[in-house]
Amino acid sequence: MAIGSDIIAKAMKNEGVSDFFYIMGAPMMAVEKSAMKLGLRGVDVRHEQAAAMAGFAYARLLNKPAFCMAASGPAVTNLITGIAHAWADCTPVIALGGAAPVVTWHHGAFQDIDQLSMFKPCTKWSDRIHHTKRIPELINLAVKHAMSGKPGPVYLDCPGDILYAEVDESKIEYPDPYDHAKRPRPAVSANDLSAIVELLSKAKNPVLITGSGVQWSEAEREMLAFVEAAGVPFYTTPQGRGVIPEDHKYCYLTSRAAAFRDADLILVVGTRMNYIIGHAAPPRWNANAKIVRVDIDPIEIASSPRNLAVGVIADARAAFQQLTAAIAGKVTPATYETWRERLRARNVQKTAEAEQTLSNPATPIHPLRLCKEVRDFMDRDCVLCVDGQEILNYGRQAIPQYTARHRINSGAFGTMGVGMPFGIGAKVACPDKQVIVLHGDGSFGMNAMEFDTAVRHGLPILTIISQNGGWTGDPNKEKPGRDLGYPRLDKFAEAFGGHGEWVDKPDDIRPALERAMKAVKSGKPALVCVVTDHNARATTTAFTNYST
C-alpha cells in the first residue's frame, strides 16, 4: 500500500523531474519527504513566490518544466505572483498546492479557500486531484499542458485527504513520460512559403524579430542558418536575447530604433506582438511595413494587428529550415547589403558614443559604469539575471548577450523581486555556469532572504546591487515612498555566511568583483553593493499610457 503523497513523488520521478522548489508544510510534507527519498533534490526557499520564480529560471535554462510546491491557504496564494509571472512569459512552471481536505470543504476548515479558482486566470491549465489512483495521469497531463504548443504554467490542487489516502500500489498505472523531443512540429505550407519568399525578394529593408518561442523550439542553429543565408538584420525581445550571439555581424543593437522605423518588411517569429515590441505599430514602426508572423499558437496569428501579409501556424525550427531552403537562389546577403550598411554605420557610431558614457569616471557611480564593469567581467556564457528598474533598463542597453536562455529579467509582467530567486533556480539548473544577479536595491529587498537559501544549499551566486538609495532615480526627490537609504547590505550577506563587498568609487568595482568571484569559486555566495547615482534616470520606451 502507498499514500497519495508517495504516488505524486513517484509520478514526478517518472516524468524525469530531478529538482523542485518548496517551503515545507502540511499537507505537502509527505510529498516532499517522499520525493527526496527517491533522489529528487528539494530546494527550500524563504518565501513561496521565490519557489515559483526559481522554477521559472530553471525551466527557461533547461527547456523543461519546473516543479514548485507549497503547503495550503496563504502558502499557496504566495505562489500566485511567481506563477502569474510565468504565465506572462509563457514558461512551464508546474505548481502543486496543498489544500484543505475535501470532507471539510465549506465547514470553516483550516485554510479552506478556493485556490483552484485563483489560479485559473494565470495558468495555462489548472485542475484538482479527486482520486488518488489517477495522480500519475494528472501529473503527466500537467507536464503535457505546460510544454505543448506555447508553453505556460499549470496548477494542480492537492487536497489533504487525497494526499493521505491509501491505495493498492499494484493498481496504479504510470503513463509513458512526456517526451518533448517528439512533440509535433507543424510546418509552413507550400503556398505560405512561396508568399514569404516573394515578400523577402521584393523587400529593401527587412528585419527579423524573435522571442522566446525560438528558444522553446530549440531553433537557435536553424535561425542562425537563415539569418546568414538571407542577410536579414535581426533583433530579439529581452527574454529571447542570445539566441544568436549579439556580436554577430548582422546584429545592430544600437540601431534598433532606426531599423524599426524604416523597415518595410517585419518577420515576427516566436513572439507576441505586445507592448514589448511596440505592437509592431507606428510610431515606433513603419506604418507601411508588411508583416509576416510565424507562431505555434493559432490565437497569436488570429489576433494579429494591421498589415498582416502572411500568418503561419508553425514551429520556429521547422519554419527556419524551410525558409533557408526556399530562399536559395532568390535571396542572398547581397540583396540587403545597402540596408545593412546603413544600420551598421549607425551602430558603429552609436556604440562608440555609448562606450564613452559607459566609461564615466564620476562619483557617485553612474549605473552605466557599473554595467560596463559587469559586462567586462562576466563570462561569455554567464547566466545573467537582472531585476530592478533603473539598473534593469541600463543593463538592457549596455550588457550584450551571447548564449541562448542565459539572460533572464523581470519580463513581460515587469515583476520585481525576481532576481535572487532567478539566481537560485539558475544555479540549480546550471551548477557549472557563472551565475550573476544584477539587482536594484528596492527589488533586492523583496526577496533578500533568498541569499540565505543560496548559502544553505551551497549555491555560489554572485549578486551585485546597484544601490541608489531608493526605488528609482529621482533628481527632484519628489516620489512618495521612494527613499530606502543606504543600509550596509554587504554586512547582511556576511551575517548569513556569505561574502560581502561595499563599493563607492568606480575604480574599486573591478577589484571587488574579483574578490567576490574568488569567494564564489570557493563555494560561497557573494554580494557586492555598489553605491550609484540616485539622479541617474534610464530612458526607455513608455510601457503604457494612463491617459483616457
Image (spheres, rainbow, N blue to C red):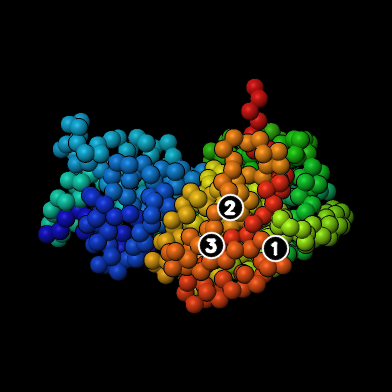
- Give percent across and percent down for residue 344: 83, 58
Residue nearer the viewer, 208 or 358: 358
The CA span between labels 3 and 2 is 11 Å
Mark 2 neighbour density, 10 Å: few (under 14) some (14–19) many (20 or more): few
Residue at x-position 19% and y-position 39%: 102
Q: Give the quadrant of the N terminus.
A: bottom left
Determine which residue is flagged by label 1.
505
Residue at x-position 41% and y-position 43%: 80
- From the viewer's perspective, tell me whether residue 188 is left or right of residue 541: left
The kind of residue tagged 2 is Tyr
The kind of residue tagged 1 is Lys
The CA span between labels 1 and 3 is 16 Å
* Image vertical order of residue 116 relative to residue 185, above or below: above
Residue at x-position 44% and y-position 40%: 122
Residue 429: tell me if it is visible: no
- Give percent across and percent down for residue 173: 22, 57
- Give percent across and percent down for residue 179: 41, 60
Which secondary structure, mark 3?
helix
Q: Quadrant of residue 343?
A: bottom right
Among numbered discs 2 and 1, the one appearing first in the sequence: 2
Determine which residue is flagged by label 3.
490
Which secondary structure, mark 1?
loop
Mark 1 neighbour density, 10 Å: few (under 14) some (14–19) many (20 or more): some
* Image vertical order of residue 58 relative to residue 39, above or below: above
Residue nearer the viewer, 278 or 548: 548
Which secondary structure, mark 2?
loop
Determine which residue is flagged by label 2.
486
The CA span between labels 2 and 1 is 15 Å
The kind of residue tagged 3 is Asp
- Give percent across and percent down for residue 421: 47, 56
Residue at x-position 67% and y-position 45%: 473
